[in-house]
Amino acid sequence: MIKGFSNETSPLNDYELRVLLPVILAGLKDKQGKRNAVTNGYIIGRLKQQGYRIDAPRLRKVINHIRTNDLIPGLIATSEGYFLAEDEQELMDYEDSLRGREEAIKAVRLAIARQRRMLYTEAQQRVIQQTLKF
């Protein structure tokens, strides 16, 4: 779980695993190629029409579970939605996109750590130095 996002990042519950996951798997397994992509909003809308309970963060969590457990190999997403890659190059391009996002997140994390040290560690050292002057 990620602090501050407990609902969004908590493990799949029994309802999500036993009820939603099979329905979502069935719906995604034939979405071969970008031309058959389906968006989060579309999936949620269809599921809700059928009486299922789900929201966008939990759908993303189910999709994450599908990907990390190899339940539908090649499931990728673009701005067009979720779909199955049609060839290796499409998967490689998606990998590169994920790597770029991963690096951008890491850069922000490192900057925040640096800023925290600047703001608090250096500030504490200045307080100590000023205290020692007396």
Image (tube, rainbow, N blue to C red):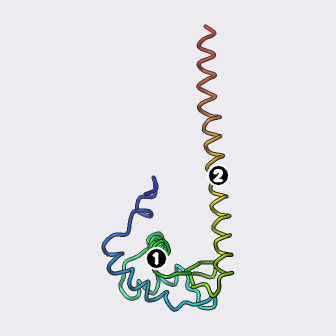
Pick out the residue farthest to the top: 134
Q: Where on the picture, by quarter, is residue 25?
A: bottom left
Q: Where on the picture, by quarter, is residue 127?
A: top right
Residue 82 position, x and y percent, is 56, 81
Q: Where on the picture, by quarter, is residue 9?
A: bottom left
| Identity of the residue drawn at 43% across and 57% down | 1
Q: Return the disc, 1 or 2, that comes first in the chain's sequence.
A: 1
Mark 2 lies on residue? 108
Image quadrant occupied by the C terminus: top right
Amino acid under disc 1: Ile
Mark 1 lies on residue? 66
| Identity of the residue drawn at 68% across and 64% down | 100
On screen, residue 134 above or below 55: above
| Identity of the residue drawn at 48% across and 71% down | 68
> For residue 35, which numbered disc appears in the image?
none
Foreground disc of the pair 1, 2:
1
Q: Is residue 106 found left or right of 21 in the rendered image?
A: right
Amino acid under disc 2: Val
Label 1 residue SS: helix
Q: Nearer the viewer, residue 25 or 7?
A: 25
Residue 8 position, x and y percent, is 44, 64
**How many discs appear?**
2
Label 2 residue SS: helix
Within 10 angstroms of label 2, few (less than 14), some, or many (20 or more) residues?
A: few
On screen, residue 23 above or below 133: below
